[in-house]
Structures are given as C-alpha cells and as structure tokens.
Amino acid sequence: MEILKRAYYLESIDEIDIVIERMTELHIAIEKEKIERFTKINDKDKVPEGTEIAEILEQIRKTEDILPLAELKYINAHKNEVLHLALKEMKEYAGDPIKYATENDFFSLYIPMLLGQWEVRTASKYLIDLVACTDEEIDRTIGDMIAECYSVVLYKCFDGNIDYLKEMIEKDGISEFSTLAYLQVLTMFWIFDQNNLPELRDYLEQLFIKRPETASQITGVIMEHHKDELLPITEKCIASEFYDPSIYGDREEYMFHFNDFSNMETDRYLNYLPIHWRVVQVS
C-alpha cells in the first residue's frame, strides 16, 4: 500500500519515469506475495492420486474461503477424465448464467479458465454466449475475478467462426466489456492465426461506420497491436463524438501509448498460465 501511495502522489506528467519505477516495485511486491501463497501448497496438501474426479469437482464447488489450488492442479493434470464434465458444466453455465453463478459461486469462475488452459474449441460458442449480456448481468455472471482474463479464455477456445463473432459484436444490448472482448479475439485471430491485416482493417472501418458507438473499443484493440496500418481508423474514432477520452486519453496520450512497445498486451494471449497459477494471478 505504501508503494501505491508513493506512485500516485505526483504532480506532473514529467514524473512519469518515477511512476513507472514505483508501479514496477508494486507489481513485484504483489507477484512475490502471490508466489509465496502458491508455494504454501506442499506435499501434505496434494490430492491423493486416484481420487475420484467427481469428488474433486464437488470439493471445488463447495470451497468458499480458500483457493482450491491443490484440487485445481489435480484436475488440470487429469484432462481426459475432466473434459466432458467441464463441457457439461459450461453448457449449463451458458444456458442460465446468473442462476448457475449464484448456485456455484467460485466454481463458475474456474470452469472457463480450465477450458481456456486446454484450448477447448468445442466450448467456443458457450463462452461467447456467456457474456452476451448487459453490463449489470456481466457483474452478476462472471464478476471481476475472471473478467480480467476472459478475452484470453475466449481466444484460446475460439473455433474460428468469424461470422458468429461478428454477429455478437454487432448485437444490440451487449455490454461494452463483451464487445471489447469479442473484438480482441477477432483481432488476435485475424493477425496471429490468419495473418490477414487487410481484412481486419476493412472490418474495423465498416464496423465504425455501421456502429460508431464502438469507437472506444475499436481504438482499444488497435492500441494493443501497434499496427500503423490501422491508425487511420483510430483518427476517425478519436475525432468522433462517440470516443471516450477517459479510457485511452486524448489523441496525444493515445499515441504515446500506441508507440510504447514496453508492454505488449498480446503476450497475455500467447502465454497462457496453467489454471492453478492463473487463479493465483487474478485473485
């Protein structure tokens, strides 16, 4: 907390180097604390080999006060036995998200992360449908814990159905969080999987024309990839009445971050942590 206070008690943008240094200290301190918590799992905490998977899942489902790291590590090591059960749970979750989240508490957060770890393509539609809702429903469905990494989960499980993803991006009544997550997946897929920047550029241009209210989300995904070819779209978005400068700043601030390659957002999509580590990271 002291590091956080020091980082923010600054008066001008000229002190940005101090901010970076102090926030780096904060990040190191947080990661150190998380690793220390993780390493408390020792041999006596491990789940005995041969334990029934259904029993482990029920233990995780009922856990409320502590992170079930040993159990998560165990089921991650038994993919073949768990996969069909995880897909069944995910289908039920997507079918009635609020009811499932209410009845299963933290267990509902672990299922998507597990499927993301395994890159289960057959879960793609369930994961997309799960967040096809309003901002209020997002809070009640997945909460803050998994929201931070949800676009990564979506990307790892994306089955390549671009038409369906476009349909959801352009759907009315979808939260800004979900629209951004869908766009992040589509952008990653077109750039890294399809190597098709021109098609992505054409789509983002048409999306802004068709739904100008997505200006902030469009500029967000463009910033993540630092592609100069997409900057003309950014200029149009920032100049529009729909762009929210409180998210990515005015044009000058936006360009500062666009040209900053010190923190590549795309790395988090490509380097996915095992579930027992990821739970520690986002908790």
Image (cartoon, rainbow, N blue to C red):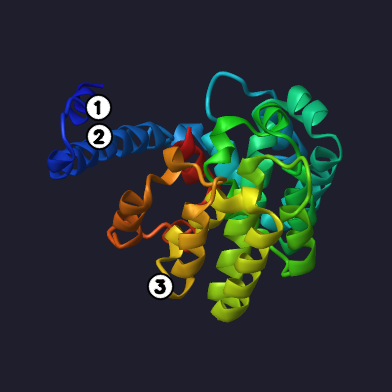
Q: Tell me what residue is drawn at x 77 percent, y 40 percent.
A: 173
Q: Amino acid at mark 2?
A: Leu
Residue named by callout 3: 228
Q: CA distance from mark 3 to mark 1?
A: 34 Å
Query: What number is the disc on residue 112?
Result: none
Q: Amino acid at mark 3?
A: Asp
Q: Nearer the viewer, mark 2 or mark 1?
A: 1
Helix, strand or loop for disc 1: helix
Foreground residue among 124 and 222:
222
Q: Are marks 2 and 1 in contact (CB under 8 Å)?
A: yes
Q: Tell me what residue is drawn at x 26 percent, y 22 percent.
A: 1
Residue named by callout 1: 4
Foreground residue among 115 and 265:
265
Helix, strand or loop for disc 2: helix
- On screen, residue 198 versus residue 123, left or right, reads left
- Above/below status of 98 relative to 16: above
Label 2 vs 1, first from the N-terminus? 1
Q: Nearer the viewer, mark 3 or mark 2?
A: 3
Circle 3 residues within 10 Å: few <14, some 14–19, many ≥20: few
